[in-house]
């Protein structure tokens, strides 16, 4: 049994696969408590792998996105193999990178919390590989992200404004992130486009 917050179908709103139709499996709970976390992920229900696979098969998309919370707390290689073999879909994960990942993930997005140690204790990255690194911009120093052990010359680097409810602050955050990307073109801007579209 795995603790699931929700399973839903939508467009990927962030990073490299923005706009891709995807089935999202949101797992409950996280090993970090970031003050800027915008996801209500602590509630959930226990679901069997059979029920999860049934939910995934309802949708035609090629992609399943494991997210949370922190999905690495709940997955193993058997679960990933089951998804691949029974649905034929590719698997992406959105992780904070602080736990090792099993084999069988097609796309790894690491959203590290290093560089903001006053908030979350600057946790160590244990993921071996990242296809993309997606950083929430809260005004922290950005240099450390380029020396993360999971990064190589092919890793895509995305900087994302910190989303807040207050519109004025949100616009200010976005302008700051745009400015930082323009100042350092090693970054690419990531926007939470699903919020602008009003979809999950």
Image (cartoon, helix red, strand yellow):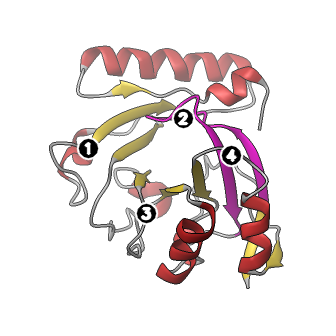
Q: Give the alpha-carbon distance from disc 1 to disc 2, as whole Å.
A: 16 Å
Q: Give the alpha-carbon distance from disc 3 to disc 2, as whole Å.
A: 18 Å
Identify the secondary structure beneath mark 1: loop
**Magenta segment includes 159:** no
**Residue labelled with disc 1:** 155
Q: Which of pointers 3 and 2 lies earlier in the amino acid sequence?
A: 2
Which of the two marks, 3 or 2, is nearer to us in this view? 3
Q: Is 82 on the left or on the right of 165, as rendered?
A: left
> Are discs 3 and 2 less than 8 Å apart at CB?
no
Quarter placement of the N terminus: bottom right
Q: Is 68 on the left or on the right of 102, as rendered?
A: right
* Residue 112 seen in this snapshot: no
Pointer 4: residues within 10 angstroms few (<14), some, or many (20+)? few
Q: Is residue 61 above or below residue 196?
A: below
**Magenta segment includes 15:** yes
Q: Is residue 198 above or below residue 66?
A: above
Quarter placement of the C terminus: top right
Q: Give the alpha-carbon distance from disc 1 to disc 3, as whole Å.
A: 15 Å
Q: Which of pointers 4 and 1 lies earlier in the amino acid sequence?
A: 4
Q: Is 36 on the left or on the right of 8, as rendered?
A: left
Magenta stretch, residue numbers: 6-28
**Residue labelled with disc 3:** 105
Identify the residue at image location x=69%, y=59%: 26
Which of the two marks, 3 or 4, is nearer to us in this view? 3
**Residue labelled with disc 4:** 38
């Amino acid at each position: 049994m795995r603790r699931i917050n929700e399973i839903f179908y939508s467009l990927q709103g962030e990073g490299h696969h923005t706009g891709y139709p995807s089935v999202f499996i949101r797992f409950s709970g996280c090993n970090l408590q970031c003050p800027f976390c915008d996801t209500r992920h602590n509630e959930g229900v226990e679901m069997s792998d059979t029920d999860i696979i049934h939910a995934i098969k309802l949708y035609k998309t090629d992609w399943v996105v494991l997210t949370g919370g922190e999905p690495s707390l709940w997955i193993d290689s058997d679960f990933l193999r089951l998804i691949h073999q029974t649905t034929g879909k590719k698997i992406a994960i959105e992780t904070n990178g602080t736990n090792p990942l099993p084999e069988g993930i097609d796309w790894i997005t690491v959203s590290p919390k290093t560089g903001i140690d006053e908030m979350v204790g600057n946790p160590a990255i244990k993921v071996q590989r990242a296809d993309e690194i997606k950083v929430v911009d809260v005004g922290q120093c950005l240099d450390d992200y380029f020396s993360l052990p999971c990064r190589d010359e092919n890793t895509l680097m995305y900087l994302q404004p910190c989303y807040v409810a207050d519109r004025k602050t949100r616009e200010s955050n976005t302008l700051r992130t745009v400015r930082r990307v323009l100042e350092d073109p090693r970054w690419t801007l990531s926007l939470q486009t699903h919020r602008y579209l009003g979809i999950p």
